[in-house]
Structure formats: C-alpha cells, structure tokens
Amino acid sequence: MLPNTGKLAGCTVFITGASRGIGKAIALKAAKDGANIVIAAKTTQKHPKLLGTIYTAAEEIEAAGGTALPCVVDVRDEQQINSAVEKAVEKFGGIDILVNNASAISLTNTLDTPTKRVDLMMNVNTRGTYLTSKACIPFLKKSKVGHILNLSPPLNLNPLWFKQHCAYTIAKYGMSMCVLGMAEEFRGEIAVNALWPRTAIHTAAMDMLGGSGVENQCRKVDIIADAAYSIFKRPKSFTGNFIIDENILKEEGIKNFDVYAITPGHPLLPDFFLDEHPDAVMEEKESNDSVPEVKEEKLQLQEESQLQKQPQMQEQPQLQEQPQLQEQPQLQEKPQLQEQPQQREQPQLQQQPRPRQQPQPFVQSMLPQKPHFGAVEETFRIVKDSLSDEVVRATQAVYQFELSGEDGGTWFLDLKSKGGKVGHGEPSDRADVVMSMATDDFVKMFSGKLKPTMAFMSGKLKIKGNIALAIKLEKLMTQMNSRL
C-alpha cells in the first residue's frame, strides 16, 4: 500500500459522504498526515443496514491523527452545503481539498426507474457535486494545494453503458462533466480531476446490490484512498484527468495489488464504464454489428468524436491541449468516445483467445461447445440435478428466463420451493427476476464463457426485478461448481 508522507499535514479536506465507505477511507488516509477533515454527510444515527455516522467517523479520524468536523449535510440542500463550508472556514481558516464522493445509484432501465429515483440520482450526483464545488471554490482558489476530486468515471460514450441504466449513467457522467468544465475554467488556480476504480469496491452499496458474499469479488476501499492520496500530492497543473486507481498506483511503484483484494487471488468484478474487459467489449462489438439502432446511434456520435481503444491514443477536439497531461500519459484516463466502424469489423480480434481467471461454473464440462437445439433444456436438466435444499435456502429467489432464438421461449428456475424446481414456461409463483437474452448467450453464461455480470454490462442480458437476486445467480454457479 502507498505510505503516507505527511504532505497533507494541516490541510483541510472537505469530503461529502464521508461517514462510511470510500469517503471515510479517504478521510482516514488524510488524517494519518494530520489533516483536518470536514465530514459532510447525512447519517447522524445508527442505521440497521448501514454502518457508521458522522460522529463515529469523526472518532476514527481523530484516532488516526486528524482533526474532525462532523457536519450534517444532504448535498441536495444548498443551505446545508453552504453552512458546512462556513463552519469549516471558521474552524480551520479555509478549505484546501474537496472530495465529491456522495452518490446515489439505481441500476434500472428507463421504464423501471421511478421519477423520484431519477431526481435522487440527478440531485445527489450531478447537482450536489456542482453546488458543493461552487461553495468551496472561492476558498480552494486561495489555497496553495487547491484540489477538487470527483469520484466519477471517464466519459465513455459507448451506448452499452447507457442502454441498461440510462438515468444512473447520465447522473454519474454529470459529475465527470463538472471535471471537464471546471478543470478548464479554473486552470492554474485549482486542480480538478476524476478518480474511478478498475474493479468493484466493497462498500455498503455493493453489499446491497450484490448481497452477502459479493465482497469476495471486490477490492478494499483502501485502493481508492491510496489513489486519491497520490493525486493530492500533485501540483495544481495536474488537472483535467480521468484517473483509474490501479494506473496511478502503478506509477507510484505499487506492483502487488492482492493487498487491496478482500480475498487475494479471487476473480474480481470489473467496474462500469471501462472498455477494458474482453468478455464485455469484444462480445458487444460482435453483437452490435447486427443491431441497426446501435449502429445508427454510433454514426450520430461519430460526427462529434472518434474512439481510439487505447487511452493514450485518444484525442478530444473539444478540449484545449494540456501539456502537463502529456508529460504523464500513463495517468490519463481520457473520456472514451465512440469506436469507428472499421475498428468493430476486425474478426481477427474477436477470434483471439483470452485467458480466464474466474472459476468455471458447474456445467462447463457438461455442455457442448456451441449451442444447438436442446442445449437450453440440457442446461436446465444439469441445473436441476445440482439443486438442493441448501441452495434454495441460500438463494430464495424465482428466476424467469425469456430466451430468444433456437430452443428459446420462457423458462424458469424456482429456488424458493422445497428442493428447487426448473422447467419450461412461467413459474407458478411470480418471478423475482426476469432475465431476457439470446439462447446462445444463455448457454455461454451457464458454460462459463460469459459471466452474468459481463452479460449485463455488455447489454446481452436485460434484467427486470431485484438486481441483488440477479447477482446471486452468478454466485450460485460458483457455489454449485465447488460441490461437484
């Protein structure tokens, strides 16, 4: 892990959502240097499912060597933001670093996202980031350090990152657009950057999305804290970057990333918005060639931009040249734009074998290499033979599969009934999760060639219902595999 240098001693760091998770981890890292931490978060009382309050976080920060100022802040409330900034300036004399960490998430498609959830994500992610930045900027301009760090992704305009959770992507990209705009607006006065993890990070939000056991596929919050610390050490000229945690830590000399894993050696879930995972990207390229509406969307976007797959080759006509960024190309995570059609028509890339790290699900050796008539039925037969009361108790979900193509139709997997049930047609009880996909992809998913997470992220798998129970299906495969 990255050692502390004392660089942030006496600095005042204002962090939204700092009562737990990534925000608190960044706070504790800075506190070890002797920094002043403003904990701007909502939680004041213990929550049955979410650990930590602004006061318990303050105690941990003080114990780590920092000075804490807990402030009740809902970033949707401009008055609460301004009040916390005033208290910080009054107590510490100014603000040196702002971390916009507070965020809301709902991985639901357009028709399944209630308006109140849309408003929540827009108001917390985009509007909250904008208003908090606005309130802190007058004081950041006076600081010798002067950093704004948004926990948001590179601006990747690949449609696959919009099609399954459009509202969330828009809200999250709003935070990233603040980086683009403010980095230019305050160039030379304040460094404005974005930080995003390469893999899933174990937080309370991830537990709620993935359920018990998902932590094994995640890294610790410490990797984000170390990456943020590395950014804070850099001068104001280091601005306008979209940084991936692993990349900047490699530049710091970190080579062993197992220290950041919850379970060292276990396969990790890739995070959203990064076209760096062959399972998702290569398969999406292949499928997009036969989807006219996606092609049409790409052509419209190509009028404004073009995609170069490797980050160091990307250019953005709308941005000014940034010499200071060019000095450190390996740290740049530029907004990723659309791929040109000729890049997608490269079958030789799709045919190259890719190494697999994930455990092979339980039916891999029992299914044919290519799907054919009866492959879906055979898959469900194998699943049925693997069911047990233990699996049912651990899952408690009914899955319905809407499969298109040969051997398709409606199928179900009932993991609520005693012993479990599978079959053709709709389940007797209402499904908790409805999964829609092609039969070819379904067989690939159960044979280990396509992970459910990758299928969802690439748009091959559409999910309606309880997303946490959907993620359980992937864990179920691994658990069954270990018993065979």
Image (tube, helix red, strand yellow):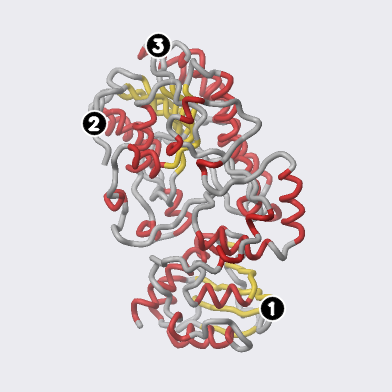
State whether residue 44 appears in this view: yes
For discs 3 and 1, the disc positioned in front in the rendered view? 1
Count residues near mark 3 (Cα–Cα under 10 Å), then give few for <14, some for 14-19, many for 20+: few
The CA distance from mark 3 to mark 1 is: 66 Å
Q: In the drawing, does residue 51 fall left or right of residue 238?
A: left
Per the image, label 3 sits on a secondary structure element best described as helix
Q: Mark 1 points at which residue?
A: 405
Q: Position of residue 444 (x, y in %)?
A: 54, 75
Q: How crowded is mark 1: few (under 14 residues within 10 Å), some or many (20 or more)?
A: few
Q: For the C terminus, give its image quadrant.
A: bottom left
- The residue at which mark 3 appears reads as 90
Q: Do the residues labelled 2 and 3 touch (CB within 8 Å)?
A: no
Give how far across and how far down residue 427 sits, in percent: 61, 79
Sequence-first tag of 3 and 1: 3
Instruction: Specify which label sits upstream in the sequence, 2 or 3.
Output: 2
Residue 133 is left or right of residue 478, and the answer is right
Which label is found at residue 64?
2
Q: Earlier in the sequence, mark 2 or mark 1?
A: 2
Q: Which residue is drawn at 44% across and 32% down?
A: 41
Q: How far apart are marks 2 and 3 (CA)?
A: 23 Å
**Along the line of sight, which residue is nearer the eye, 201 or 319?**
319
Residue drawn at x 34%, y 80% as measured from the top left: 483
Quadrant position of residue 55? top left
Q: Tell which tag, 2 or 1, sits nearer the viewer.
A: 1
Check disc 1 and give the amino acid type.
Answer: Gly
